[in-house]
Image: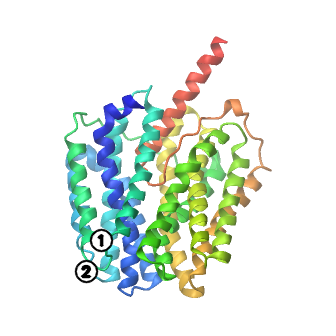
Amino acid sequence: MVQVLKDSWALLLGIGFLMIGNGLQATLMGVRGNIEGFTTFELSIVTSAYFAGFLGGSRATPGLIRRVGHVRVFAALGSFISAALILFPVLTDPWAWAGLRLIIGFGFSGVYVTAESWLNNATSNETRGQTLSAYMVVQMAGIVTGQAILSQGDPSGYILFIIPSVLVSISFAPILLTVAPAPAFESTKPMSLVQLFHNSPLTFISMILLGGVFSALFGMGSVYASAIGLSVGQVSTFIAMIFVGPMVLQYPIGWISDRMDRRRLIFMVATVGGVAAIAGYLLGDSYTMLLIVAFILGGTANPLYSLVIAYLNDYLQPEDMAAASGGLIFINGLGAIAGPIFVGWLMGVIGTEGFWLTLAFLMLAIASYALYRMTQRAAPSVEDTASYKAVLPTSSPVWVEAAGEWAIEQAEDNENLSGNV
């Protein structure tokens, strides 16, 4: 790990600034939107626009990079993000906000693709696993730090919009001034959605549902928390717990997943998340209970993302793992776009309880489908399964491919060890 930090500290630092800015602005949208009097459904459109932009950016950025290069794409998209962030308090209209969030989502996705390409290029086979781990920690720590900044500011003013703009601008320096050369960008022909479903119906369906879960938690969590009357400090702590959960639970779940039928673990983890959401619905009047529920939901939803990717890899040839990443990001993005709109609509119909009911339905739907799939085909032996590696839903296809490459390397190492016994 020391070697990883020595080789990639500038890239990780720049990515850390990006995540602080993204985590701060995502929560700030819900809090400030409530102050401006936006309806829950209007804020759901604003949230959905971010994920629509994110999906569009993940698909368009590779072509942009091939035409003009990493540096220009990174600088251009980062400039758009920085400019859009400081326009929110000026253009206090939900449709203007939706347009700005679309730009920000597109920009952040493209910036992640570019930065993660650099980081992956700077990683050797020997340090890839450690780099993946360090990157995940930086992502979550950055989002949590963004919540800490929000808790100390005034969401009705301008400063909290200026801070993420400045952070995004500052992130350019350590990334663009790093000695690492810009990598040659190679795009993998994506696996068709039909092939993806054929290889693992459970992963296909779970990815769609998890897109809704993550966008509801990350995008609509602050809308819900503001709607029930929590203070700014309480809202930021509530959102922070969503990311503290996976920091604590990601690795225990990953360790277990390499030692048992992953479908059974998917069922168990999704069930725990669904029960936690029901607890939020029944006991949401207690702030302490809200923090516990946020910790458990975040601690189950984020590892589930990595878990279903690892399960898909169990049924793929090593050369197909990278091809599957584009399809996974696409179907997850579709779920992420639809999730906030459904949550916002349901909250408008039945009240704030719609937030928990949506999450409970999505998590228990994953659990139910996992239980059904266990009756449809036998599980591969534990010795034949791919290795689990934590990947957050905020990662681009580049990093999902990097996790696949690491799984391939682990599989090859295991085969070599078996052959030498």
Whether residue 29 is visible here, answered yes or no, is yes
Neighbor class of circle 1 (other Cα within 10 Å; few <14, some 14-19, many 20+) is: many
Q: Secondary structure at mark 2?
A: loop
Where residue 169 appears, as percent x and y from the top left, is: 21, 56
Residue assigned mark 1: 100
- Give the Cα separation between the discs numbered 1 and 2: 9 Å
Circle nearer the N terminus (1, 2): 2
Extreme right residue here? 375
Where residue 51 appears, as percent x and y from the top left, is: 42, 64
Neighbor class of circle 2 (other Cα within 10 Å; few <14, some 14-19, many 20+) is: few
- Work out whether residue 347 or residue 68 is closer to the camera in this orientation and state it: 347
Extreme top residue here? 420
Query: What amino acid does circle 1 point to?
Result: Leu
State the mark number for residue 91.
2
- Work out whether residue 302 or residue 230 is closer to the camera in this orientation and state it: 230
Asked whether the beta carbons under mark 1 and mark 2 sit within 8 Å of each other, the answer is yes
343 to the left or right of 152:
right
- Quadrant in which the C terminus appears: top right
Query: What amino acid does circle 2 point to?
Result: Leu
Image point (23%, 67%), residue name: 162
State the mark number for residue 112.
none
- Quadrant in which the N terminus appears: top left
